[in-house]
Image (cartoon, rainbow, N blue to C red):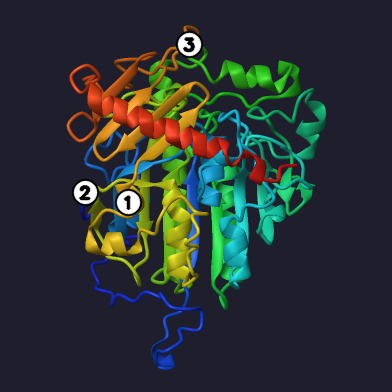
């Protein structure tokens, strides 16, 4: 991790904080009540399509990228080099984040639309039952049942007391009012959506605002409103997802890129505008990267505002903050995943290994690089342990808590087991340092891939890699280590049978 990075507010203090961790019951039985440790507030920040090299706390940071406020979280806690999501796209990945389980258990197609079963607990439901105030702000996406406040996938139906945001893959950053919604032939797409957003279950207009800033404003309001009891804030930005060119003017000027006119109904369908500006053509490769950096810059500044608000409220030391990207960077939006190969949509490392940082000054060490493998399946049990909630031992959760492994700098229980992936016809198994994978590149001819991204070296072939020696997946070991490949293929087949055996156990809409 890069140390002593200058930040907007000079946050990075080296004051030593006495470590304390709440590990007993919520009442802290058997201890001196005068020494009771208060349950931490918990903030989960999910960014959208952030590249593995697009976090400047990393030593492999991409050129020109600076994220000083995200780095504040890393400098105040833990920087993960080896963090994985369960899918290379947002919807199934998020299903696993919020349930702590492989989404393949209830999705026979093992693809985009996993949904959210009625009989699977979410992080919000468990924390709410333990006395936490719960709020979600931003993007809600489980691959199905969009724009509908009555379904299980809607935040108020799975544990959140309040919600401000949208129900779709993506949403326009600027156009959040009823007038544009009514004048548009197709406002309710999955990725190409615009118009009013939800305030709880009511569609509400916002004018003269920008989603990244609006979501941060509402997150700060939530923090200031919930001072007396522990809270869980799920802050899911649509940054840095397409439409990547939509950035406030000050950031366009800083990064020297032109302003593109916002959509209006004279353009025709909104999906046509969305498509035209999510490919190289009207925007060049070089411009796409600059728009990405401008969008990321705005996101980082807003995370800084959030951290400042926590500090001003006196909540920073006992707030657990975890920031993670929902999948690998999207090169068509200008993201950078180097030194990994591949990108979002692929099972190469660039599609499933993501930036992730965690801080909790009262419970975890600071300025720590953690290079053991972790997964977003570990987020749920980590939050439970931090909150003093008993972690189920019945196999319901597929990850394990990272609290003790981080403090001891050891691999977690789940890291000692294989990690499995399946997305449509692509799949992978990671076991210790080895990865067996079948991946495809995502590089349609009419959407050139940005030049700084490496394509996979063996698309469309089963390949075996030693990730410790070859994180860029350039050297296929399938022939020289065929025995290991067969062992991992057997592991995969056993896992698939286990997933298939679960299908009838989940109640879907």
Does residue 476 appear to the left or right of 438 in the view shown?
Answer: left
Q: Quadrant of residue 491?
A: top left
Q: Residue at x 49, y 55 (%)?
A: 395
Q: Residue at x 40, y 20 (%)?
A: 439
The residue that mark 1 highlights is: 71
Does residue 468 appear to the left or right of 496 in the view shown?
Answer: left
Residue 196 shows up from this direction:
yes
- Report how far apart the C-alphas of labels 2 and 1 lie in the structure: 9 Å
Nearest to N terminus: mark 3 or mark 1: 1
Nearest to N terminus: mark 2 or mark 3: 2
- Report how far apart the C-alphas of labels 3 and 1 lie in the structure: 34 Å
The residue that mark 2 highlights is: 2
49 relative to 458, above or below: below
Q: Residue at x 70, y 33 (%)?
A: 194
Mark 2 lies on a secondary structure that is loop
18 relative to 201, above or below: below
Nearest to N terminus: mark 2 or mark 1: 2
The residue that mark 3 highlights is: 444
Residue 164 at what x, y percent from top left? 67, 51
């Amino acid at each position: 991790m890069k140390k002593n990075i200058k930040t907007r507010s000079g946050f990075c203090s080296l004051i030593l904080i006495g470590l304390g961790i709440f590990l007993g019951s919520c009442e802290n039985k058997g201890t001196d009540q005068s020494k009771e440790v208060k349950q931490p507030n918990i903030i989960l920040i999910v960014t959208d399509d952030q590249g593995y090299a697009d976090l400047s706390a990393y030593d492999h940071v991409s050129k020109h990228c600076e994220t000083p406020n995200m780095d504040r979280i890393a400098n105040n806690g833990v920087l993960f080099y080896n963090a994985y999501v369960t899918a290379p796209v947002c919807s199934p990945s998020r299903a696993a984040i919020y349930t702590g389980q492989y989404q393949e258990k209830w999705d026979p197609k093992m693809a985009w639309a996993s949904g959210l079963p009625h009989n699977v607990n979410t992080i919000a439901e468990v924390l709410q039952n333990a006395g936490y105030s719960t709020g979600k702000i931003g993007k809600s996406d489980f691959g199905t049942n969009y724009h509908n406040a009555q379904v299980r996938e809607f935040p108020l139906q799975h544990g959140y007391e309040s919600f401000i945001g949208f129900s779709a893959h993506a949403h326009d950053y600027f156009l959040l009012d009823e007038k544009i919604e009514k004048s548009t032939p197709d406002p309710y797409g999955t990725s190409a959506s615009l118009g009013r957003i939800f305030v709880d279950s009511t569609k509400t207009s916002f004018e003269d605002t920008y989603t990244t800033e609006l979501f941060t404003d509402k997150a700060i309001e939530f923090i200031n409103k919930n001072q007396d009891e522990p809270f869980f804030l799920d802050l899911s930005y649509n940054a840095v997802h397409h439409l990547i060119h939509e950035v406030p003017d000050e950031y366009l000027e800083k990064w020297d890129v032109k302003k593109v006119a916002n959509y209006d109904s004279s353009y025709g369908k909104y999906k046509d505008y969305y498509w035209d500006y999510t490919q190289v053509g009207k925007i060049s490769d070089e411009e796409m990267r600059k728009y990405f950096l401008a969008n990321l810059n705005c996101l980082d500044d807003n995370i800084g505002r959030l951290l400042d608000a926590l500090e001003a409220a006196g909540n920073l030391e006992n707030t657990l903050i975890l920031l993670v990207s929902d999948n690998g960077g999207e090169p068509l939006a200008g993201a950078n995943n180097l030194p990994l190969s591949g990108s979002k949509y692929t099972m190469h490392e660039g599609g499933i290994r993501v930036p992730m940082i965690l801080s909790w000054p009262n419970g975890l060490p600071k300025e720590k690089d953690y290079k053991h493998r972790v997964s977003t399946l570990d987020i749920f049990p980590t939050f439970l342990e931090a909150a003093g909630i008993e972690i189920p031992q019945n196999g319901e959760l597929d990850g394990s808590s990272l609290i003790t492994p981080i403090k001891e700098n050891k691999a977690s229980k789940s890291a000692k087991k294989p990690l499995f992936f399946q997305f449509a016809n692509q799949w992978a198994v990671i076991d210790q340092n080895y990865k067996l994978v079948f991946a495809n590149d995502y590089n349609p001819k009419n959407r050139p891939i940005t030049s700084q991204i490496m394509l996979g070296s063996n698309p469309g072939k089963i390949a075996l890699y030693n990730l410790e020696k070859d994180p860029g997946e350039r050297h296929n070991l399938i022939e020289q280590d065929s025995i290991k490949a067969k062992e991992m293929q057997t592991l995969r087949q056993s896992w698939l049978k286990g997933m298939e055996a679960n299908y009838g156990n989940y109640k879907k809409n």
